[in-house]
Amino acid sequence: MKPKVKTDYELVQEFVNGNQNSIEILIHRHKSKLYTYILLTVKNEQLAEDIFQDTFIKVINSLKAGKYRDNGRFLSWVIRISHNLIIDHYRREKQLNTLSNDDYETDIFNSRKMSDKTIEDTIIQDQIESDIRNLVEKLPDDQKQVILMRHYGGLSFKEIADQTDVSINTALGRMRYALINLRKLIEKHNISLTSK
Amino acid sequence: MPMVKSSTLLYFYNDFVSENELIKPEELIFPGDYLKDELDYIFGDFEVEPSERVVKSILEQV
């Protein structure tokens, strides 16, 4: 009989009660989704890692301060914290459109798990990942935000609307336009997003 | 502000309203599967891992 997998909230409770291992499990459970969300948003690996780290430090401090109210949506809460940190960063740096992407392509591939794959699989996977990255980069920032929050953070449209200071209808509209744009791009560039 | 024909606006409004009618209200408030298939098709299981170094650094600060 398999041991029961603890819920995020159970782990949060354990951490608040002094079990340090629980936060490690939570970080490992959600690190990929959170990091991918940040990386696709900021397009720079070093910056993404800095924000990833700052996010979890803030999460830990908030948990210790008893600021987390569970609604079964731990990752959404974490994504919202990272979103605010990304905004803070751009406000501070005022370089929203001036970041260099030079190191992005190299880093994104270096940091991906490459084990247990044939060379052919790896090449195909590289191509797919490159295509996804290019597709996302071509979207306007407001549409990109909605897509990433929805897919990687699992946020509802109301949460996305609250987070981005727009109405629910606007958030929904941005999502639809993003998907329309992505579909057009996939068709235009004849992109295949499956390795089968 | 650029001028937009009212007929054009009406077209987009009707299109938007008719699409919205397909969504259950709770889908807007709570996370749901609306458009999930399309997102899954585009992103698949595309995820990138942060370096072990950064994870270790966080845990050292706990």
Image (cartoon, helix red, strand yellow):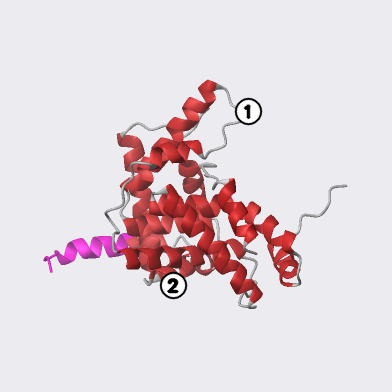
Q: Pointer 2: residues within 10 angstroms few (<14), some, or many (20+)? A: few
Question: Is the magenta region chiefly helix, strand or loop?
Answer: helix
Residue occupying image coordinates x 13% and y 69%: B1
The answer to whether residue A103 of the structure is visible from this angle is yes
- Between disc 2 and disc 1, the foreground one is 1
| Residue found farthest to the bottom | A66
Q: Can residue B18 be seen at all in this image of the molecule? A: no
- In the rendered image, which residue does mark 1 sit on? A116
Q: Magenta part of the protein: which range?
A: B1-15
Q: Would you say residue A113 sits in the magenta stretch?
A: no
* Chain containing mark 1: A
Q: Is residue A189 left or right of residue A64?
A: left
As rendered, which of A194 and B9 lies closer to the eye? A194
Q: Position of residue B46 (x, y in %)?
A: 51, 42
**With respect to residue A166, does A32 lie above or below?**
above
Q: Foreground residue, A167 or A28?
A: A28
Q: Residue at x 44, y 66 (%)?
A: A85
Q: Name the disc covering residue A103, or none.
A: none
Dot 2 falls on a residue whose secondary structure is helix
Q: Indicate the position of residue A116 as horizontal and vertical percent values.
A: 63, 28
Q: Residue at x 36, y 52 (%)?
A: A178
In this view, the residue in front, A109 or B59, is B59
Residue drawn where x is 43% and y is 31% of the image = A127
Mark before the other along the chain sequence, 2 or 1: 1
**Residue A44 location, x and y as percent?**
40, 49
Name the subunit of mark 2: A
Q: Tag 1: residue type?
A: Asp
Residue at label 2?
A162
Q: Secondary structure at mark 1?
A: loop
